[in-house]
Amino acid sequence: MCGESLFQELLEGLVTDEAPQLFAIAQEYGERVDCRIAAWGLAFANHAEVVSVQGGLRVRLAEPEDALCCFNMGSFVRAHLVWHNSAGLSE
């Protein structure tokens, strides 16, 4: 047992250490003609969860890269995995 403030620090450390990484699946139309975010995902230590923006698809995968095949469409629409960079956010 420990005090409330120490326990809060332990919890915050646990959240920091265990937090999943956020990523997006972006679809590129043509050769850099246009693009859109097709899905968002969370990468955990042993799997990834992906949810499409339009809500029609939710999958659990071994690796984030495994989601790309779900969002490629022929040779005109190509999917890209893009890791979220929280350092670029303003406060």
Image (tube, rainbow, N blue to C red):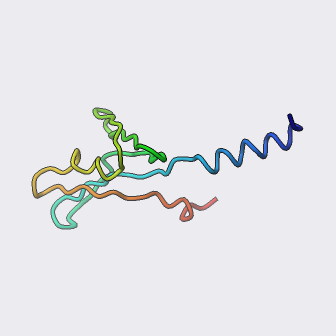
Residue 39 pos. (x, y %): 34, 45
63 with respect to 43 (left or right): left
Instruction: Specify the quadrant of the image occupied by residue 3.
Output: top right
42 with respect to 58 (left or right): right
Residue 12 pos. (x, y %): 71, 46
Image quadrant in which the N terminus is located: top right
Foreground of the two, 50 or 35: 50
In the displayed structure, would residue 15 be above or below residue 86? above
- Looking at the image, the residue that sits furthest to the bottom is 31
Instruction: Specify the quadrant of the image occupied by residue 47.
Output: top left
Image quadrant in which the C terminus is located: bottom right
Residue 55 pos. (x, y %): 33, 33
Instruction: Specify the quadrant of the image occupied by residue 79.
Output: bottom left
Foreground of the two, 71 or 67: 67
Foreground of the two, 4 or 72: 4
Give the total number of marks visible in the rendering.
0
89 with respect to 13 (left or right): left
- Residue sitting at x 42%, y 58%: 83
68 with respect to 2 (left or right): left
- Residue sitting at x 76%, y 44%: 10
- Residue sitting at x 32%, y 40%: 52
Residue 41 pos. (x, y %): 40, 45
- Residue sitting at x 19%, y 58%: 29
